[in-house]
Image (tube, rainbow, N blue to C red):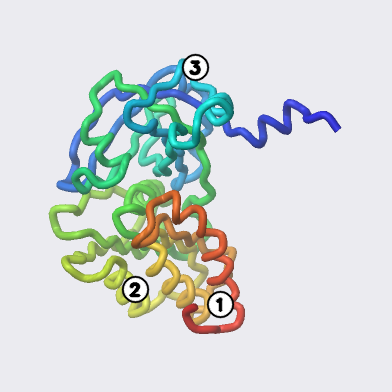
Amino acid sequence: MAERPADRERRTPRLRHARVISSERITPHMIRVVLGGEGLAGLPVGDHTDHYVKLLFAPPGVSYPEPLDIEAVRRDLPREQWPTTRTYTVRAWDPAGPEMTIDFVHHGDEGLAGPWAAGVKPGDGIHFMGPGGGYAPEADADWHLLAGDESALPAVAAAVEQLPPGARAKVFVEVEGPAEEQKLVTAGDAEIVWLHRGTRPVGQALVEAVTALDFPPGDVQVFVHGEANFVKELRRHLRLDRKIPRERLSISGYWRLGRNEDGWQASKREWNEQVEREQETGGADG
């Protein structure tokens, strides 16, 4: 059977192009980049607070003809010249611009996206795919639980800002130290707790805080994202110990210690399936 155009479109996400409008360092390790341009017109952002896009980074010394045809690149160039993707949350969206804000964790020369964000200038371009997403605070929840590390902070912050007026929320954010805290504005009744990691393992303070929390009564909607190992611990705690239904949980590992995004994404499905099996059986860590 001949392949229909609609089938090809579903399999190949739409590629868009944006240009840097501005960038600023909002904390010692967080850089905010605002993107704009005609490529953002009609971008379907707004329904979720965890919207994300996949940014494309070319290898050093490699450039592609415009408009970029990712299928042609993968067909005609060796794999080492293909662009690398990195996934980032849409921190804010202004359809009037249109403008899309993305916050990047920056640790010197480590990684791809952080150094890019540290060196960009207005007018620089970037290709991206997306958005995806699936979570937003629901008005009918009795209360909300949000927990995450720096990688989840943009999504947590976006959710806190969009809490319904008076909505009760317990929010835990783990960062390196006091200098990494950000001011979060909300119409909700949110208790925001900043946990300073220092030299402790990533997520240890989050696990301690959530497991020690005196849960308010009623229906809770949960958002827990960040490093995969602490996410796994909290997912087990929330499902097995707190008996929270799966449909009330938005839980995912954004990254994993010792893996870059390529390695983590390649193993993420197997990792999640293993966690689900353990939760169903009440088993220990594998």
* Mark number displayed over residue 279: 1
Name the quadrant containing residue 122: top left
Q: Amino acid at mark 1?
A: Gln
Residue holding disc 3: 67
- Would you say residue 162 is visible in this rendering? yes
209 or 24, nearer to the observer: 24
* Mark number displayed over residue 207: 2
Q: Secondary structure at mark 3?
A: loop
Q: CA distance from mark 1 to mark 3?
A: 46 Å
Q: Earlier in the sequence, mark 2 or mark 1?
A: 2
Q: Percent x, y for residue 125?
A: 35, 23
**Vertical relation: 102 (above or below) 248:** above
Query: Which residue is located at x 47 percent, y 59 percent?
Result: 252
Q: Earlier in the sequence, mark 1 or mark 3?
A: 3
4 or 169, nearer to the observer: 4
Q: Amino acid at mark 2?
A: Val
Q: Percent x, y for residue 38?
A: 44, 17
- Would you say residue 187 is visible in this rendering? no
Q: Secondary structure at mark 1?
A: helix
Q: Secondary structure at mark 2?
A: helix
Q: CA distance from mark 2 to mark 1?
A: 17 Å
